[in-house]
Image (tube, helix red, strand yellow):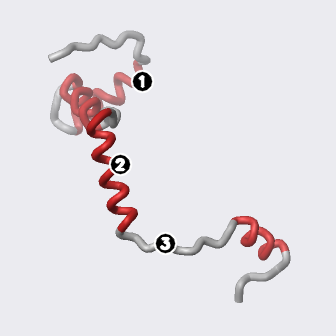
């Protein structure tokens, strides 16, 4: 497993993570390890899988006609509230 050393982290940030770690009943290192794991970037195959899953979800939803923004602004300006 790799190791990372991060320097020059401001004291407020460290204190906030220490507080969060204590609230979760774990060490600062464990808290940061969990955050790095949960929020790691989607790259490579993981990104492709996520994109395929999102495409499948979008395919389940039928298209809905959206009112163009300029029509909404024009109606509001002209006093038409769509009664």
Between 36 and 31, the one nearer to me in the picture: 36
Crowdedness of circle 3 by 10 Å Cα count: few (<14), some, many (20+)?
few
Q: Earlier in the sequence, mark 1 or mark 2?
A: 1
Query: How far across and down, in percent of the image, does residue 9 sit?
Result: 40, 16
Between 34 and 64, the one nearer to me in the picture: 64
Query: How far across and down, in percent of the image, does residue 48 sit?
Result: 32, 42
Distance (Cα) linking label 1 and label 3: 47 Å
Is 55 placed above or below 37 here?
below
Q: Quadrant of residue 22?
A: top left
Which quadrant holds the C terminus?
Answer: bottom right
Name the residue at 82% across, 80% down.
79
Name the residue at 35% across, 55% down.
54
Residue 61: image tag:
none
The residue that disc 2 covers is 51
The residue that disc 1 covers is 12
Q: Which element carries disc 1, helix, strand or loop?
A: helix
Is 49 placed above or below 28 here?
below
Between 7 and 37, the one nearer to me in the picture: 37
The residue that disc 3 covers is 63
Query: How far across and down, in percent of the image, does residue 65 sit?
Result: 57, 74
For this orientation, the residue located farthest to the bottom is 83
Crowdedness of circle 1 by 10 Å Cα count: few (<14), some, many (20+)?
few
Query: How far across and down, in percent of the image, does residue 46 sit?
Result: 27, 39
Mark in the foreground, 1 or 3: 3
Q: Which element carries disc 3, helix, strand or loop?
A: loop
């Amino acid at each position: 497993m790799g190791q990372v050393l991060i320097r020059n982290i401001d004291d407020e940030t460290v204190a906030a993570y220490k507080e969060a770690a204590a609230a979760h009943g774990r060490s600062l290192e464990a808290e940061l390890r969990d955050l790095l794991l949960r929020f790691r970037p989607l790259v490579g195959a993981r990104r492709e899988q996520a994109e395929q899953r999102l495409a499948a979800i979008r395919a389940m939803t039928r298209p809905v006609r959206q009112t163009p923004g300029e029509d909404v602004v024009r109606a509001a300006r002209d006093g038409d509230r769509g009664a």
